Image (cartoon, rainbow, N blue to C red):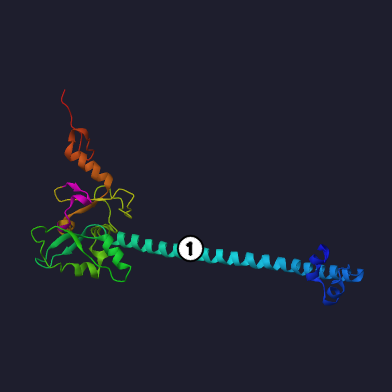
């Protein structure tokens, strides 16, 4: 059997194989049938190729879509967790004023804000004292004051107590409204009975309730003027008093 017969024998019908087994070339009509069959097979493969490509592309796109959705969901969950941690940290940080259960007097305390914020993700925050104005003398107390913080942490914050005290008040000197207190702006101060003024951080937390009973609100500009008048009177002209006359 020659080479041409070997190459085409696998694709020939049974009748064509029988006639070509003697080594003779198949008739012209059989060759035309073979070409038609090969063309039909080729056309079938060509017709299937776009569908195969589409399904492969679809599979790849579906995998990419699933991966993108997983990444987006994970990013949203991480952002929500981070937001809750930041809000919890801002909520519990700072000095707090509580009533000490032992002597029933105010005391200044601080809690671990990061631990409280992390514990709040599970539902109920856990508070641990990191500072108390009565320490170290009473460092071995039973921490019963934590119940006040657990009940209302916002009302225990020194910042919130002062903001509530300033609400609706005017400056004792210039008469301007104190207005909203923002973190990025200069905070108002207090005017004490001895006519001295003090900023928030200068007032011990355990003395804050008593101080606010007799103090008056003072804006920051008047606080600077009052401080200069008391500490450097030679540099300040007090227009509220008549000018001194020099005798010739």
In this rendering, position of residue 185 left or right of residue 228: right
In the displayed structure image, the side of residue 229 where residue 87 appears, left or right: right
Image coordinates of residue 27 in percent, x first then y, are 91, 70
Residue 190 visible within the image: no
Magenta part of the chain? 195-206
Q: Residue at x 19, y 67 (%)?
A: 146
Q: Residue furthest right?
A: 28
Q: Identify which residue, 88 or 208, lies in the foreground.
A: 88
232 vs 114, nearest the viewer:
114
Which quadrant of the rendered structure holds the N terminus? Answer: bottom right
Viewer-proximal residue, 186 or 167? 186
- Taking the spot 22% from the left edge, 67% from the top edge, the residue there is 149
Image x and y of residue 110, in percent: 20, 59
Whether residue 203 is in magenta: the answer is yes
Image spot of residue 231 (x, y percent): 17, 38
* Above or below, 204 relative to 125: above
Question: Badge 1 is on which residue?
Answer: 71
Residue 102 is inside the magenta segment: no
Helix, strand or loop under label 1: helix
* Residue furthest out toward the bottom: 15
Q: Quadrant of residue 54?
A: bottom right
Seen at 30% across and 64% down, the residue is 118
């Amino acid at each position: 059997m020659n080479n041409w017969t070997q190459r085409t024998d696998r694709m020939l019908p049974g009748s064509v194989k029988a006639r070509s087994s003697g080594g003779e070339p198949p008739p012209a009509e059989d060759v035309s049938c073979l070409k038609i069959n090969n063309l039909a097979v080729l056309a079938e493969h060509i017709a299937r190729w776009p569908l195969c490509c589409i399904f492969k592309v679809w599979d790849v796109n579906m995998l990419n879509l699933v991966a993108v959705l997983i990444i987006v969901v994970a990013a949203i969950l991480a952002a929500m967790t981070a937001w809750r941690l930041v809000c919890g940290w801002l909520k519990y940080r700072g000095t707090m004023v509580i009533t000490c259960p032992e002597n029933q007097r105010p005391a200044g305390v601080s809690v671990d804000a990061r631990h409280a914020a992390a514990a709040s993700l599970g539902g109920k925050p856990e508070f641990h004292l990191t500072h108390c104005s009565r320490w170290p003398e009473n460092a071995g107390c039973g921490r019963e004051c934590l119940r006040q913080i657990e009940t209302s942490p916002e009302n225990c914050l020194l910042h919130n107590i002062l903001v509530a005290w300033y609400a609706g008040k005017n400056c004792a000197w210039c008469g301007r409204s104190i207005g909203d207190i923002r973190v990025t702006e200069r905070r108002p101060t207090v005017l004490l009975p001895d006519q001295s003024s003090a900023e928030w951080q200068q007032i011990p937390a355990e003395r804050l309730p008593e101080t606010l009973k007799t103090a008056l609100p003072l804006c920051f500009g008047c606080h600077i003027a009052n401080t200069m008048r008391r500490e450097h009177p030679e540099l300040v002209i007090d227009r509220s008093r008549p000018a001194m006359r020099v005798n010739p």
